[in-house]
Structure formats: C-alpha cells, structure tokens
Amino acid sequence: MASRKEGAGSTAASSSSTSGAVGKGKGKGGPGDSAVKQVQIDGLVVLKIIKHYQEEGQGTEVVQGVLLGLVVEDRLEITNCFPFPQHTEDDAEFDEVQYQMEMMRSLRHVNIDHLHVGWYQSTYYGSFVTRALLDSQFSYQHAIEESVVLIYDPIKTAQGSLSLKAYRLTPKLMEVCKEKDFSPEALKKANITFEHMFEEVPIVIKNSHLINVLMWELEKKSAVADKHELLSLASSNHLGKNLQLLMDRVDEMSQDIVKYNTYMRNTSKQQQQKHQYQQRRQQENMQRQSRGEPPLPEEDLAKLFKPHQAPARMDSLLIAGQINTYCQNIKEFTAQNLGKLFMAQALQEYSS
C-alpha cells in the first residue's frame, strides 16, 4: 500500500501543470479560507466507487482510485473516476504513475473530464486517519489546491445509509507539513490539535433528470421491502467492533504518552545536571582566582550534554483524531439504539 501512496503523490505533482486550467476564474480567498466550499458528485461516480469495493475490497483491504472533474468558483464537481488496479509487491514492472497518466490521456481523447481533482479510499470501520493518508493528501493538495479525498465506508453503507465524506487538510496543517517539523514546539507554535487537522467539505450528489425519472420508475416497479428489521432492538457487532478498535487506539495513545513523559523527565534531569555542572565550574574558577591561578578553559556544553531527541507529535495527533472518529461512530450508533429502546418502551406502556 505504500507504493500506491507514493504513486498517488507523484501523479498529483505531475498533473499540477493541468491544474492551472482548473483554477481559472476562481477567486482566491484569504489565508484561512478553504479553496473548496462544496463537493458535487455525479451519482455515476458514487456507483463506480461502491462497485470498485465490491469487486476488489475484502475485509480490511483498502481500495483507492483517482477523482476527475473541474472547479466552478468554490464548488468542486467530480464527474468521473477510475480505480487503482490491484497488484502485488512482486509486480515490480507495473508503473502506477504511468498508468494514471495514460488513463487521463485516454479520457481526454474521448472528450471526458480528465482533470485531476483528488482521490478516494475505502475505510474499515472508519479507520482512515493515518500517516499514509496525511502524506498522500498533502501531496495532492500541495500540487492541486482544490483536491479532496473521498472516504467511503462500506460497512456503514451496508446498514442502509450511504457513508461518503470529503476531507481536506486545514491551512494550518498544510503549513506545518511544508516545514516538515513535527516537534512539540512547532505544533504548539502553530496551535495544531487533532480538531484542526482535517476539514470536512459538504457533499451533494447530483443526477441528471433522466436518471431521476428512471429511479422513480424503478421505485414504483420494485417490490416493497420488508423493513421491520430496522426496528430490531438487537445490536449488531458494529458497536462491539468500534469499541475494540477504540480501545486499541487508546492503548497506543497511552504508550505514546509514556514515551513523551520519559522524554520530559530525561530532559529535566539533563537540565539539572547541566546547572549543577555550571555551578561547580563557577565555584572552582572562584577558588582558582583566589589562588591567583588562571580560570578553567571554556567548554562546549552542547557536546557534554547532548540534547535528547524530541519524539514527533504528529502520530499522537493522528491517533487522537482516529479516537475522535471512533467516538463519533459510537455516538451515532448508540443514539439510534437508544431511540429504538425509548420507542419500544413507550409502545409497551401504551399497550399495557
């Protein structure tokens, strides 16, 4: 999966020459404004993403692809997409960057929107806040300012509601990633928290009038589905799986906190040793001065007390962001279950 991420970033960089046409006619906002206020997706693109996962996604396997379209003022219109082909690590001859460029060239020849506007990825129980996604989206957004990443959750979609969200990196995080300094001091100076890493862009799914008429006809002809299972009070394994993943991330966060506390203790201990050393040197120089002897030569304290390497804090922010995602999923699921329980209790009291 790492090679795929690298290929995605390379393609974004190579397609930056065509992104100029995408941004024409669009006014630039302030430094804190997002380049995209809304994402409009054709229904066919959504079906392609769902079909891609159904054909190649299995369990925790992640499927990815390229999004094509154009930008109209502050609205990103996604009109087409194509998937990354599945291949093994042993397939060294396959060049993903070349494959993507050939696909976009072929689409241009048949007069289909071929401008690169982002990428999509499936997720397993909402586990998408990772360093790989951060690096890939930074590569895309650095080369193409308007690009987004679509996150498709097939498990939540299978329960009856389409789960498709669009994300972008915030301007603050883009600046930090450009500097490539993820030390505690740099993140504190930039005022970056897990809540200021990704920004969600509203999504609107648009179909043509002919497709809407067809869907209306199909809805009339389709048999009425049995929907009593929607009122079932039994909880599925969705809640248990999210709780298990949440506990795993909390354990990772605890280990990361232990590492950071160890670094802080070692740094404090080193500062005390450095201060004691300076005091001893000062006392000894005073004694040598009273005896009429020359003071001791100056020494480089940086060599005597080498500073400890500060642990990178970006991984901690990503873990915190993933924990927040799991909490939101659990909140949505429990809210639905509690609603059904209260409804069942009211019906029971009414019947009795």
Image: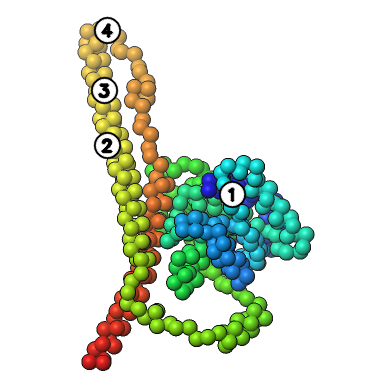
- Farthest right residue in view: 109
Marks 4 and 3, how far apart in space?
20 Å
Nearest to N terminus: mark 1 or mark 3: 1
Name the residue located 36 percent from the left edge and 80 percent from the top edge.
231
Residue hosting label 3:
277
Choose the circle earlier in sequence order: 4 or 3. Answer: 3
The residue that mark 1 highlights is: 87
The numbered dot on residue 265 is 2
Q: Does any portion of residue 230 appear in the rendered image?
A: yes
The three-letter amino acid code for the residue at tag 4 is Glu
Please name the amino acid that badge 1 sits on.
Answer: His
Instruction: Indicate the position of residue 48 as horizontal and vertical percent values.
Output: 60, 66
Hey, which quadrant is residue 347 in on the image? bottom left
Where does label 4 land, which residue?
Answer: 293
Earlier residue among tags 1 and 4:
1
For label 1, count other residues whose C-alpha is less than 10 Å away and answer few (under 14), some (14-19) or many (20+): few
Real-space CA distance between mark 1 and mark 3, rounded to the nearest whole angstrom: 59 Å
Relative to the observer, which residue lies in front, 151 or 181?
Answer: 151
> Viewer-nearest of labels 2 and 3?
2
State which mark lies toward you, 4 or 3: 3
Give the residue type that dot 3 points to: Tyr
Disc 3 residue crowd, few under 14, some 14–19, many 20+, Cα 10 Å: few
Q: Earlier in the sequence, mark 2 or mark 3?
A: 2
Pointer 2 and pointer 3: residues touching (CB < 8 Å)? no
Which residue is found at the position 67% from the left and 50% from the top?
Answer: 99
| Badge nearest the viewer, 2 or 4 | 2
Tell me which residue sits at (74%, 55%) in the image: 105
Classify mark 3: helix, strand or loop: helix
Q: Amino acid at mark 2?
A: Arg
Q: From mark 2 to mark 3, how far is it between C-alphas? A: 18 Å
Question: In whole angstroms, how far apart are the C-alphas of marks 2 and 4?
Answer: 38 Å
The quadrant in which residue 82 appears is bottom right
